[in-house]
Amino acid sequence: MDSKLALLSRRRIGLVALGAALGGGVVLAAQRLLQPVSGQRGVRAFGAKGDGIHDDRAALQQAIDFGGDELWFPSGQYRLTGPLRPRSGQVWRGAGPSRSVLVYGGAPTEVPFNLLHCDGNDVLEDVTIRDLGFLGGRSQQLSSSPQGQEGFALYLRCALRAISILNCRFQHFGDGRSGGGGVILGPRPEAEGQGLESLRIEDCVFADNGNVPGLYIAACQAPGCNCRGISVNNNSFAGSVGSTKVQNCIYILGGGAQSLLRHVMISGNRFELDTRIDVAIELNWVDTFTLSGNMLHFQAVMPGSSGILIRDGCANGAIVGNVIVSDRADNDLRGILVLNFQHPGTITNLVISDNVVSGVIGAIGVDRGSTGVVVANNRISGSNAQASVGIRIVDASGVLVNGNIISAMTQAMAMGMGDRPASGLRNIVVEHNRFDRCGGDGQALIAAIVPLSGWAAKELLIRDNTAVDSVAGSRQIDPVFFCRRW
């Protein structure tokens, strides 16, 4: 007997013996993982073949419409030539995201469609999709989406409540130009009375999707919409090869001041970005949020892009314990940026603490209308790249910068008034920070950004900071600042 076959035979005998010794529990448990549980209806009972050749759309839609509360997708490739319309009160379960796969089967020359689609006045609630794969046709797509709204894996632009997407894989969606992508959830901006409540996206993989490479969640703009409760945890995101337009991996968008999206948690996600994207995580008009334990690794950078971007109208949030690393010495990447695009605007009550930011040109920025921000106990490191800045504070108020360790940045800190009407810099405290091996090009470790007119001494306090092994010729602080103590 061949030695490899003999080894396999011995392993099989061992597994059988182990199963027998445990009353067959191990073997039966493994088998049950790949079988429907009680009450589930298998989609093949409705005619779905799952062979990757036949069109299973009609059979799957029939299973959705008449198959009961739980649908079982056995291992297979379920080819679709048109969208499926999910319905409320169902659980879809597969044998695993690499075993049970819904496959885009549209012609490359036709306008792409969304694999799962709901829109308009639809209401979708109490739906769980788990252990399924979704495979698009982006690499073969020759026709683009006219409005950019086609070519998604999941396009659920309606009122949503209690939606869970668990252990799924979304890959190769989008048209390679300016449409489609991974998953888009939530009503259209103009929708009235459509809420967005209790969404969970966990343990999923988003890989090689164009335009929207990952997850886009949006609330309606009409007043009175109930928009709250978003959890995006333990997912994996990768870049999009060859796409001409790539946006954000995670984009959470509230409807504006009259329709904030509340109670958002984004934690434990992994970003391995070897192609260029705009932003890894972006929040806009979100109130009460936590971003924690996310790991962002950039091997390619789009000019002006950011790891984490907190935008207009965000409030009451914590950005804690994230790791942002770039391998590119020539990058134009910001690590964590707090910035109002509209002016005047406000972003209020944030804590940015205990993050690790390495290899980016601008590690942490608090900019343009931000107020009530704590930047504390972060570890920032660079390579003394030209014009690199550890912490930037511009046109902000009520900011505490405390206990940070900043290494090998041209400017450990930079502060300025801003250059727009009503810009200002007020009530800033910089204390107990450590600057290691910073400086270069004659720069000050704490540098000034002009214009700086109209400052009052009581509004800026810089004290008890430590500079170690500064680059020769570097000043500790720009003389324009009035300091009580250094």
Image (cartoon, rainbow, N blue to C red):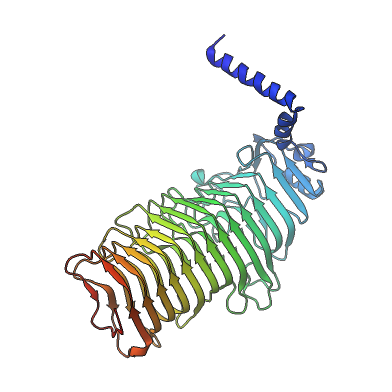
**Foreground pick, 114 / 43:** 43
Residue 84 seen in the figure = no
Task: Return the x and y of residue 301 as percentages of the image width and height.
Answer: 37, 56
Q: Is residue 235 above or below residue 371?
A: above
Residue 374 seen in the figure = yes
**Foreground pick, 40 / 210:** 40
Q: Report the number of numbered marks.
A: 0
Task: Return the x and y of residue 115 as percentages of the image width and height.
Answer: 63, 50
User: Within the image, what quadrant is residue 18 found in?
Assistant: top right
User: Within the image, what quadrant is residue 306 found in?
Assistant: bottom left
Which of the image's four quarters has the C terminus? bottom left
Which residue is located at x 41 percent, y 65 percent? Answer: 378
Q: Is residue 8 left or right of residue 193?
A: left
**Foreground pick, 77 / 357:** 357
Task: Return the x and y of residue 317 as percentages of the image width and height.
Answer: 54, 71
Q: Is residue 394 left or right of residue 70?
A: left
Q: Is residue 484 above or below residue 49?
A: below
Q: Is residue 405 above or below residue 100?
A: below
User: Within the image, what quadrant is residue 15 found in?
Assistant: top right
Residue farthest along the left direction in this orientation:
473
Residue farthest along the top direction in this orientation:
1
Which residue is located at x 73 percent, y 38 percent? Answer: 48
Q: Is residue 448 left or right of residue 351?
A: left
Task: Return the x and y of residue 320 as percentages of the image width and height.
Answer: 50, 64
Q: Is residue 47 above or below residue 13?
A: below
